[in-house]
Image (tube, rainbow, N blue to C red):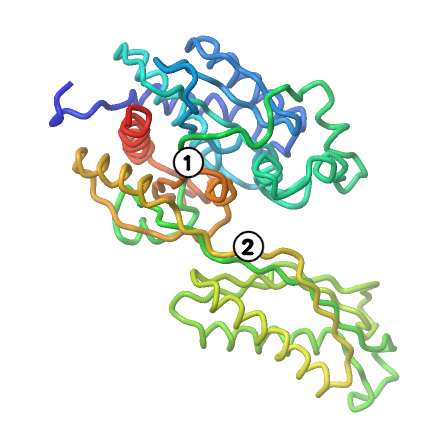
Amino acid sequence: MGNDMPLKVNGQRLWDSLIAMDEMGESRPALSAEDFAARALFADWCHQAGMSLDADAIGNLYARRAGHDKDASPVVMGSHLDTRPGGSCFDGSYGVLAALEVVRSLNDADITTTRPLEIAVWINQAGERFAPAMLGSATFCGDVPLLQALTTEDGRGISVATALSGHGGDLPLGRPFAAYFEAHIEQGPVLEQAGLPIGIVTGGQAICWLDVEVNGSTAHAGTTPMALRRDALLGASAMIGQLEKLATEHQPHGLVTVGQLLITAAARNTIPGQVRFTVDLRHPLDVQITAMEQQTRQLLQQVAAQRGLDVSIRRHWFSMATPFDSGCIAAVRQAVTALAYPHQDIVSGAGHDAMNLARHCPSTMIFIPCRKNPAQHQAEYATPDDVRMGADVLLGAVLAQADS
C-alpha cells in the first residue's frame, strides 16, 4: 500500500450493518431489551471479526483486536448504541459500526497494527432513560463515582444496577488508552450547508443547563382582574423573551434554548401559579458561557421582581468547553488530506462521549453531515457516500496512531 493509495473501507458492508442494526429497534433506551439486542448483534459481528469482548462494572462494552505489542495501551474507537426517541440509525451507531468496519477492513488487508485496537460501546449516552447523559463514559473516566452511577434510577425507579444485572464485566474503569477517536453524524446543518462530507472536530462547546421554577398565585380565570394577578406562565413567557434577546448579544456562537416547560396543575380556567422550564446555554468559550449564565440569572430575577413573582434557578449540569488533542486532530487532518476529501474544521455543538474521554486521553472526533430525508422519515439522514468517507478517514487516522 503506497502513500498515494490510502486504505479504504467496504462502504456497502458498513451501510448494510447500519441497516441491520436499525432493525434492533428505532428507539433503544439504555439497558433496555432493545439495547441489549443491539449489543448482542454487535458482539456477534465482533466475534466473527476475530475480536475478544469484555465489559466493565458500569456495562460499557469493549471489543479488542490484538496488536503486535500486546502490552501497549490500545487506540480506541467508539460511540453508543442506545438511541433517543425519534433518532436515526446513524446517531451513535455510526461511530460503533464505522469502528467495526475499520477492523474488518484491516482484516481484509491482513494488516496488524502495533498497538491493539478497541471498540468501546458506551452506555446511556443519549440520557433518555438515566441522567446524566454520557453516564457510561463519565463513570469510566471517574467523573461520576461508580456507586452513584449504579444507584441512578430511571423514571420508573429502576436502577442502573438492576437494569444492568448480568451484563457487567471485569475490565477496570479508567484504564489507559493511547488515543480515542469517535466518528459521528454532525446533528447540525453546518456541513450540509457547506456541501462538505467531513468535519474535523477541534473541540466541543461549553454547556450549561439550568432548571427554573417560577411561582405566582393560582387563581380563577374569570374572577381575578388582570392587575391583581401573579401569573407564573406570563412571567415565564416574559423571561423566555428576554433569553432570546440574550442570545442575540452573544452571536455568532451563543445559543439559548428552552426545551421543556411544565405548568403545574394546568387547567383551562385557572391562572397558572407555578411553571417550571429548562434553559440550555452553549458557547465555544468558557468565559462566554459563564457570562451567559450570570446574565440569565439576572434577567430572570429582574422579570420576577417586576411582576411580583418568585423565581428559583438551579444549575442542573455544566460542562466546560473541550479542546481536542492536537496530535489526534493532526492524524485526522492527514488522513482526510491523503484521501483528498473536502472538509472543514468544526466545533461540536452537541455533547458526546469523546468530550469525557478528552479529559482521560488524547481524543478527537470526525463528523459527517446529516440532513433531513422526509422520504425515509428520518430527521438525521446520512448518505451512503458520506458514511463511507467518514469511515475512510477514521481508518486512516487510527492506523497512523496505532503504528506511531
Tag 2 secondary structure = strand
Binning the other alpha carbons within 10 Å of mark 1 as few (below 14), some (14 to 19) or many (20 upward) gives: many
Q: Which residue is mark 2?
A: 319
**Vertical position of residue 353 compared to residue 293: above or below:** above
Front-most of residues 394 and 262: 394
Q: Nearer the viewer, mark 1 or mark 2?
A: 2
- Please tell me the numbered disc located at residue 182: 1
- Comparing 335 with 387, the one in front is 335
Q: Position of residue 26 (x, y in %)?
A: 56, 32
For numbered disc 1, what is the local secondary structure?
strand
Crowding at mark 2 (Cα within 10 Å: few <14, some 14-19, many 20+): some
Q: Quadrant of residue 222?
A: bottom right
**Residue 231 in picture, x, y percent from top left:** 77, 78
| Structural distance between the alpha carbons of marks 1 and 2 | 19 Å
Most foreground residue, 61 or 342 = 61
- Identify the residue at image location x=37%, y=15%: 69
The tag earlier along the polypeptide, 1 or 2, is 1
**Placement of the N terminus among the 4 image quadrants:** top left
| Amino acid found under the numbered disc labelled 1 | Glu
Q: Position of residue 308 (x, y in %)?
A: 77, 85
- Report the residue that reaches farthest toward the front: 71
Amino acid of disc 2 = Ser
